[in-house]
């Protein structure tokens, strides 16, 4: 440790050796916990320098709906590393979430949230839990592509991509290796979303093969989340898509008993951002009683990311020792088990006093040499033969008898594409629907080439041209059908690239 610090002192003499970090002081308790965290970082001898950026409430209220100034973007693109305190998104129309803006604009594809119990020093029902949730951060339902299509129906597109899945899943395995983790669990719902979640699961299985040293398994997200809530000790690293990850990482933080104490990293190819998982806590802002632990843990992750493993361990161990010594801010202070009730600054000073010490009861942090920035290879697209075999035409129709719309559609069309079936909210209602199925005004009408052949009971689709689709649409429009949208049906290397209707 001493050698490392001496080396760091040497490095500090030349400004060039310092990694510049863009620092967002945030709102509410943000400035208080950031001041405390920077004080600790400086005392630890971390070879960092800090450049403040303007983001958050004041920027929003000055009329910038994204909450981030142009100058802040410049500093971020120069420095590539951000330490961010929580910010307050003002209530009202038009303000965009700064977090989502930063994640998407900067390509921060991986959201990493480690949560481990600090039993018996911080109350939890799960003394042995130690989980890292790695959540895909850029796509899924968070693409934000939504439409109202009829009087009754609204849709949100769920986009799962192969490059996005490969990146996050490989990151999870690389993280497991770098941080000495034993198991990666994938959470999906591919029993229902066979194509989108099916892709995520398939990529997981492909990549897991490349990491035989790490145990891997998959759970369906519903029962998987229930098991996390009931028996979190059974999980190690969890990798999942954006929405599931959002939910499950909050469950993990909550049951860890340490929402105010967990840090998180948002990792991209070029840029990385580190922050506490909690918000700006306006209810206690200005009182200097906030717990800076979440941001301190984010700073530990920042140091590890910069391959400053010894410094990361030193900071983490000093923090663990402080918690273990019962020096607690009011949010975790307990008459019975705590020793000293401290404010934000006093907590930071206590951590600084313990730099170089290790906890005696909690698990000592020992990162592998070489842990740090994880390199993900460039994506190589494998091109499959893509063939158009049909079209789903979505129609707004106010009637409620599927037989009626089915017959009207059959009458209206005379070209080579024929109506194969109609679904309503995914359930086949024509031909041969059942009267109990509730129907909205949103009808998905599947047209394919007249002769669909069967091979081993599986329909073999015949290829069509897009001009067939256009001819069909012209006929439908001539018969006054209200076409909302079309979705082309493709096969890729002969594999169906679309789901069947329920009951098709
Ligand atoms: P919050 O996390 O700010 O507060 C929830 C509760 O936890 C409050 O009682 C608060 O006092 C307490 N708390 C949170 N952090 C604490 C700490 N470090 N020490 C002691 N107590 C702490 O959640 P909220 O009240 O729902 O949100 C407040 C604001 O924060 C909102 O404007 C929200 O949009 C924003 N927010 C920002 C981020 C971010 O920037 N990453 C994340 C979440 C919420």
Image: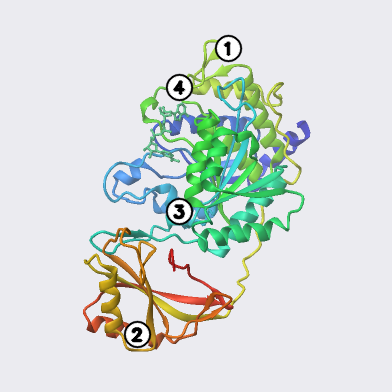
Residue 122: image x %, image y %? Answer: 57, 22
- Neighbor class of circle 2 (other Cα within 10 Å; few <14, some 14-19, many 20+) is few
Q: Is mark 1 within 8 Å of ligand 1?
A: no
Q: Which residue is mark 1?
A: 339
Instruction: Give the quarter of the image for residue 391.
Output: bottom left
Residue 394: image x %, image y %? Answer: 33, 71
Rendered view: 177 above or below 194: above
Front in this rendered view, residue 456 or 369 = 456
Apparent side of residue 280 relative to residue 198 in the rendered image (left or right):
left
Q: Which residue is mark 3?
A: 73
Q: Secondary structure at mark 1?
A: loop
Q: Which circle's residue, 1 or 2, is located before the other in the chain?
A: 1
- The residue at the point 63 percent across, 47 percent down is 185
Q: Which residue is mark 2?
A: 470
Marks 1 and 3 sit apart, C-alpha to C-alpha, by: 44 Å
Q: Which circle's residue, 4 or 1, is located before the other in the chain?
A: 4
In which quadrant will I find the N terminus?
Answer: top right
Marks 4 and 1 sit apart, C-alpha to C-alpha, by: 16 Å
Q: Which residue is mark 4?
A: 289
């Amino acid at each position: 440790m001493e050698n490392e610090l001496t080396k760091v002192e040497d490095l500090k003499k030349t400004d060039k050796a310092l990694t510049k970090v863009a620092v967002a002081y945030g709102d509410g308790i943000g400035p208080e916990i950031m001041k405390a965290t920077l004080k600790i970082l400086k005392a630890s001898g971390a070879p960092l320098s800090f450049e403040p950026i303007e983001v958050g409430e004041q920027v929003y209220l000055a009329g910038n709906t994204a909450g981030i100034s142009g100058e802040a973007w410049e500093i971020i693109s120069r420095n590539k590393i951000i330490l961010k305190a929580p910010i307050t998104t003002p209530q009202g129309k038009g303000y965009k979430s700064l977090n989502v803006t930063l994640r998407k604009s900067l390509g921060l594809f991986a959201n990493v949230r480690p949560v481990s119990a600090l039993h018996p020093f911080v109350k939890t029902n799960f003394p042995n839990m130690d989980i890292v949730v790695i959540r895909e951060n850029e796509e899924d339902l968070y693409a934000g592509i939504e439409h109202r299509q009829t009087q009754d129906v609204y849709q949100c597109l769920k986009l799962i991509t192969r490059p996005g899945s490969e990146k996050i899943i490989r990151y999870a395995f690389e993280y497991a290796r770098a941080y000495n983790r034993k198991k990666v669990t994938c959470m999906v719902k591919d029993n229902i979303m066979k194509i989108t979640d099916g892709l995520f699961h398939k990529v997981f299985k492909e990549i897991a093969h490349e990491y035989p040293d790490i145990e891997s398994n998959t759970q369906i997200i519903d029962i998987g989340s229930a098991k996390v809530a009931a028996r979190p000790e059974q999980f190690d690293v969890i990798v999942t898509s954006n929405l599931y990850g959002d939910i499950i990482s909050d469950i993990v933080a909550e049951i860890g008993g340490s929402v105010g104490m967990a840090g998180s990293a948002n990792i991209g190819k070029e840029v990385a951002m580190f922050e506490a998982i909690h918000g700006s806590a306006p209810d206690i802002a200005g009182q200097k009683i906030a717990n800076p632990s979440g941001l301190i843990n984010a700073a530990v992750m920042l140091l590890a990311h910069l391959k400053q493993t010894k410094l990361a361990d030193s900071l983490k161990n000093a923090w663990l020792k402080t918690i273990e010594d019962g020096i607690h801010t009011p949010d975790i202070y307990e008459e019975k088990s705590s020793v000293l009730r401290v404010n934000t600054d006093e907590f930071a000073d206590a951590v600084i006093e313990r730099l170089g010490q290790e906890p005696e009861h909690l698990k000592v942090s020992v990162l592998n040499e070489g842990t740090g920035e994880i390199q993900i290879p460039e994506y190589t697209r494998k091109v499959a033969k893509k063939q158009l075999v049909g079209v789903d035409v979505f129609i707004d129709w106010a009637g409620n008898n599927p037989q009626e719309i089915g017959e009207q559609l059959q009458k209206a069309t005379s070209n080579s594409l024929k109506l194969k079936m109609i679904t309503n909210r995914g359930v086949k209602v024509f031909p041969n629907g059942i009267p109990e199925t509730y129907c909205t005004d949103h009808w998905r009408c599947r047209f394919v080439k007249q002769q669909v052949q069967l091979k081993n009971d599986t329909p073999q689709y015949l290829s069509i041209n897009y001009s067939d689709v256009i001819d069909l649409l012209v006929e439908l429009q001539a018969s006054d059908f209200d076409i909302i949208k079309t979705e082309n049906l493709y096969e890729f290397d002969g594999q169906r690239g679309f789901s069947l209707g329920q009951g098709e």
